Image: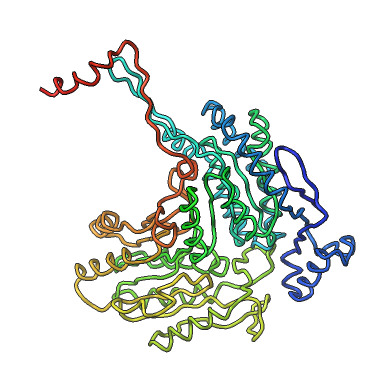
Amino acid sequence: MPTYPSYVNGEEIHSEKYAYTVSGRAALEDVFASLTLKRQLEQGRLDARAARGKVVGRCAVADAATVDAAVRAAADAAPRWAAFPLERRVRAARLVRERLRRHRAELVEVLVAEGTPRALAQWQLAGMAEASGDETVNWCAGQLHQEFRHGRRRLIVRRVADGVVCVNPPQNAPAASAMFASTALLAGNALVVRAPRSGPLGVMYVLRELVAPALAEVGAPAGVLNVFCARPGPVLRSWLDSPLVNDIFYTGGVERGLELQAQCVARGKKPVLELAGNDCVVVWRDADLDLAAEALTEAFYGSGQICMVPNQVVAHPEIADALLERLRAAAAALRPGYPEDEGALLSPVLRSERFFAHVRDAVAQGARLVHGARRLEVDGTVSDTGPFLEPTVLRVDGLAACRDVAAVREETFFPVLPVVVPEPGSDEELLEGVVAHVNANRYGLRNSLWARDEGVIEEFVRRVGNGGLLKVNDSHIGFLPYLPTHGGTGLTGGVYGEANYLALRTSHLQGVSIADGVRPRSAVFDAYAALT
């Protein structure tokens, strides 16, 4: 059984307590038995050898002393790592990507064992590779340091590392989030990462097997990377209280995230937030409906438990019926399965009360259930107690009051896709209303448009300011070089929200002038004369 101790200042720290990971397949075969097994192992009432075939690994649970030691190690290493030439930090990023490519099959198996459907594990790896790809890394490096000549001066505009960046990954995609967090190293920061107890193996694999060896190869100080497994509450409080912590990168719910933002600001720390999404996809009357429906089906990947999938659609009235029929067929074709099954795209939804409450709310307000809204067993049969939720499509008529429906107004985080059909009108009026609707979204992760009319595309791109990423006639969740994989505005990223290149978000701008033979008095008073 793979065992990961805490990793602090280049050393492994073992513990008397461990968090055990039960395989995704075993959990689906018997949820109650799996939870009981995990509890017995973590309480020391069962020998791990008795759980072979069901438990896929364990991670040491860090105590308060280990959490504190990780921050102190990072604070000691940060200034030394920031002093490394940018070229060496860029080389470390490239080495991470090379190791990712070499170990991609092994990492996929780790994610599948933790319960991620294989196809989505591969998609996550593609995102990891893109965030650390040459195009994106080189662009970020260019933003970190630029030089100019101005007379007898050498001028530098650079970004300086904030210092110690503490990272709290989400429970739904912790390994991908940990890999993304490692991009803060490019700026010269030191990292402290808390692996969640619900899914620590992928985080540990990414940081211990991919990132740590790359840092060692370029000679980085040992404390540049620290990772442990622990409960979030005490760790976040210790980070907030520590004078050594500069930034906290938090991924989680809106309410806790905004609360943490206020606490960070009160303590002089920078909050970097990845919270919720309520992404809107607009489908215009001239769109390729087959491709648009294919992209909209991404709303159901991982059973909607991915923040960047489509959460709502605004469909032009002329094509709404045709689009809904395509979505109904696409939703019906998606089936549950075990994580290792080829083609499985749905994940179990452990708490489904809000899903059914949202469906009831929508129907009560006049929405029509097009497809879904049932529980499913792993073999796809309908069941009152199944761990999966059937992909669900709703039709909501009217743009003006559509946000009265909770499934339109809020992030849902389960497999329901409301399709809003605006009131008929001229194309000019419709486009005006659609743009206003997208910009009025309280969230702001991603937005998409499907259209052929170049004028409509230009107007959409020019006027939609909501969100960290806009996509036109493209996969909503696919990754691309140069463009951000994370970040957004509004409730997605807090008051400081924007597209998130973490090397830039965890650094600050500084200007530098290096002069040779310049007279200070002339620099002050001759500038005005030069204006004449």
Residue that sits furthest to the left in the current view: 532
| Rendered location of residue 102, percent (x, y) | 67, 41
Q: In the figure, is residue 223 to the left or right of 368?
A: right
| Rendered location of residue 437, percent (x, y) | 30, 68
- Closest to the observer: 118 or 530? 530
> Residue at horizontal 74%, vertical 53%?
63
- Image quadrant containing the C terminus: top left
Q: In the figure, is residue 507 to the left or right of 218?
A: left
> Residue at horizontal 89%, vertical 60%?
49
- Closest to the observer: 105 or 329? 105
Q: Is residue 499 above or below residue 276?
A: above
Q: Is residue 498 above or below residue 36?
A: above
- Closest to the observer: 73 or 200? 73
Q: In the figure, is residue 104 to the left or right of 154?
A: right
Residue that sits furthest to the top in the current view: 517
Occupied quadrant, residue 173: bottom right
| Rendered location of residue 334, percent (x, y) | 57, 72
| Rendered location of residue 191, percent (x, y) | 60, 43
> Looking at the image, what colour scheme do you see?
rainbow
- Image quadrant containing the N terminus: bottom right
Label total for image:
0
